[in-house]
Image: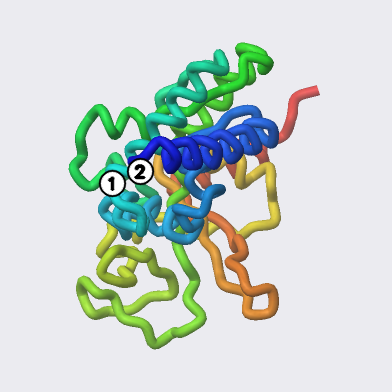
Amino acid sequence: MSRKNRNALADRVVRAAEATLTAQGYVSPTDTLVRIGWLDVGAVERWRRGQIDCLERAMQTNPPRILEALKLFQSWGAGKGLSASLTDYLARTPERQALRFSRGGDPAVEVLWRTHWVSQELSEKKRQRLAEKASRAPDLVVIQPLNSEWTCHRCGGTDDLLLMENCGPACLRCVGLDDLEFLPAGNALLSRRVKAKSTRWAVVVRFSRSRRRYERQGLLVEPLALADVKSDLDAPRGG
């Protein structure tokens, strides 16, 4: 890469990183590359769902140029005196497998992708909360389909709910979630406590044609956890 092109790229990376840092107090490589236009938010979401094997495959930019941008981002964060935070990225699938960023899977490149930079102006407690939030596995999302004619790509069957996989929609039985019970939205306290008690759970969404977005319908939770929490909430309180 020529000096002129490198300087131009450095300016773009720095501007994008600075804007994101100002907005949220920390910044990741994916935030930065989305802001400079190399990454599409929809592609990042498909990657988080395990539908793209590596994030670089969703980018039109060649790997050497991507690597140069990552190094510039790293240099900017270190030079600004920010705190480096390594973040685990897990897929939004029942297996919660580790996600891959680069085509080659080089550990050194993967570390560059996973490094977030956090403002030193934030309190230690806030920085810790941000690190925990970033490393937390994303919500598993189950869909109430508008089309009742769909078929599971694994078994050919159908159901009221589906989970999107690389090869298409899958029924809950095939992905091992058919033992969970649906808890409709509406009772925030019940939902929060059951989610905390349930070792496996998923968010249920349905697409709204009028609002053109997916909207939360409730949760799938473990029946025993739901029964236990309901019992606790229904139990009379001592005086």
What's under tag 2, amino acid-wise?
Ile
Question: Is 157 located above or below residue 76 in the figure?
Answer: below
Residue receiving disc 2: 66
Q: Callout 2: few (<14), some (14-19), or many (20+) C-alpha neighbours within 10 Å?
A: some
Q: Position of residue 135 (x, y in %)?
A: 44, 31
Q: Is residue 98 visible?
A: yes
Badge 1 element: helix
The residue drawn where x is 23% and y is 80% is 156
Query: Count of labels shown?
Result: 2
Is residue 145 toward the left or the right of residue 152 in the image?
right
Q: Is residue 228 visible?
A: no
Q: Position of residue 23 (x, y in %)?
A: 69, 36
The residue drawn where x is 63% and y is 79% is 209
Question: Is 138 located above or below residue 152 in the figure?
Answer: above
Q: Callout 1: few (<14), some (14-19), or many (20+) C-alpha neighbours within 10 Å?
A: some
- Screen quadrant of the C terminus: top right
The residue drawn where x is 21% and y is 39% is 105
Q: Position of residue 211 (x, y in %)?
A: 69, 73
Q: Position of residue 205 (x, y in %)?
A: 54, 64
What's under tag 1, amino acid-wise?
Pro
Question: Could you give the CA–CA distance between mark 2 and mark 1, rounded to whole angstroms?
Answer: 5 Å
- Screen quadrant of the N terminus: top left
The tag on residue 63 is 1
The residue drawn where x is 35% and y is 43% is 66
Q: Kindly indicate whether the residue at mark 1 contacts the one at mark 2 (C-beta within 8 angstroms).
A: yes
